[in-house]
Amino acid sequence: MSTTIQHPAASRVATHHVRLTRRGRLVVFTLSLLAILAVGVWLAAGSVATSQAQPTEVIVVGTGETLWDIAADVADDGDVRSTIAEIQQLNDLDGGMVAAGQRLRIPLA
C-alpha cells in the first residue's frame, strides 16, 4: 500500500511592473520639473530683500575725509556707527577705508 501526501501548492506572488507609456513618462517628468521649480521659487522668495530702496545721494570723498567724518555729517545727531554701517552696506565696503576721489552712496536723512 502506498500513501500519497498532498502538499498545498505554493502560491505565487504576482509581481506587477508598472509600465508607463510615452505620454505617462512625459507627465511624470513634467510634474517632477514643476515640483522642483516650485521649491526653487519658494526658496528664492525668502532671500529677496523686503525693505524698499531708500533714497541715496552720491558724494565724492574729499582729501583727508574719513568714513566717520562722512557719517557724522549725514547722521544729524543720530548714531554715527549705524550710519557707517548703512554706508558700508550701500557701497559694498568691507572695512572703513575710503580714498580721496572715491564716489560713495550715502543715505538721505
Image (cartoon, rainbow, N blue to C red):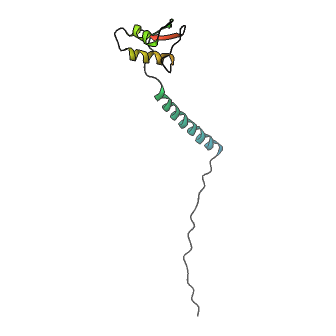
Q: Nearer the viewer, residue 55 or 65?
A: 65
Where residue 52 appears, x then y in whole percent? 44, 17
View extreme (front): residue: 64
11 vs 61: above or below: below
Q: Is 32 located above or below residue 4 in the figure?
A: above
Residue 89 x %, y % = 47, 19
Write the residue at 46% across / 13% down: 67
**Could one spot residue 52 in this view of the protein?**
no
Residue in view at x 53 percent, y 37 percent: 35
Pick the front one: 2 or 79: 79
Residue 17 appearing in the image: yes
Image spot of residue 32 (x, y percent): 56, 39
Q: Quadrant of the C terminus?
A: top left
Q: Is residue 107 left or right of residue 27?
A: left
Q: Residue furthest left?
A: 77
**Above or below: residue 69 compared with residue 28:** above
Q: Quadrant of residue 37?
A: top right
Q: Is residue 63 above or below residue 47?
A: above
52 displayed left or right of 1: left
